[in-house]
Image (cartoon, grey):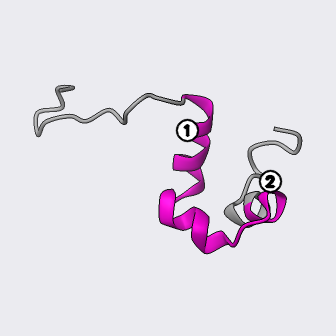
Amino acid sequence: MARGFDATTIQAVAAHSGVHASAIYRRWSSRIELVEEATFPGFSPLVSDDRGRAG
């Protein structure tokens, strides 16, 4: 949050947290997923069927 969304990269998070970037990628496949989970902890991703209905 201190540097904004554009500066929030996996590499920046890894450097700040003291872990290797590969450890972060094992849990989150993208920075979007990481930011979503940090912002909305405990919410599962929205899944829809082939007709676009949430389920």
Q: Residue at x 68, y 62 (%)?
A: 10
| Furthest residue toward right | 2
Using the image, determine if residue 20 lies above or below residue 33: below
- Give the x, y percent position of residue 43: 43, 28
**Disc 1: CA contacts within 10 A as few (<14), some (14-19) or many (>=20):** few
- Give the x, y percent position of residue 54: 21, 26
Residue that carries the numbered disc 1 in the rendered image: 36
Using the image, determine if residue 44 lies above or below residue 4: above
State the extent of the magenta-drawn residues as a range: 14-40
Residue 16 located left or right of residue 42: right
Report if residue 11 is visible in the image: yes
The N terminus lies in which quarter of the figure? top right
- Give the x, y percent position of residue 42: 46, 29
Q: Are marks 1 and 2 in contact (CB under 8 Å)?
A: no
Q: Residue at x 53, y 30 (%)?
A: 41
> Tag 2 or tag 1, which sits nearer the N-term?
2
Query: Hey, what amino acid is under mark 2?
Result: Ala
Residue that carries the numbered disc 2 in the rendered image: 7
Q: CA distance from mark 1 to mark 2?
A: 15 Å
| Element assignment for label 2 | loop
Using the image, determine if residue 15 lies above or below residue 40: below
30 magenta-colored = yes
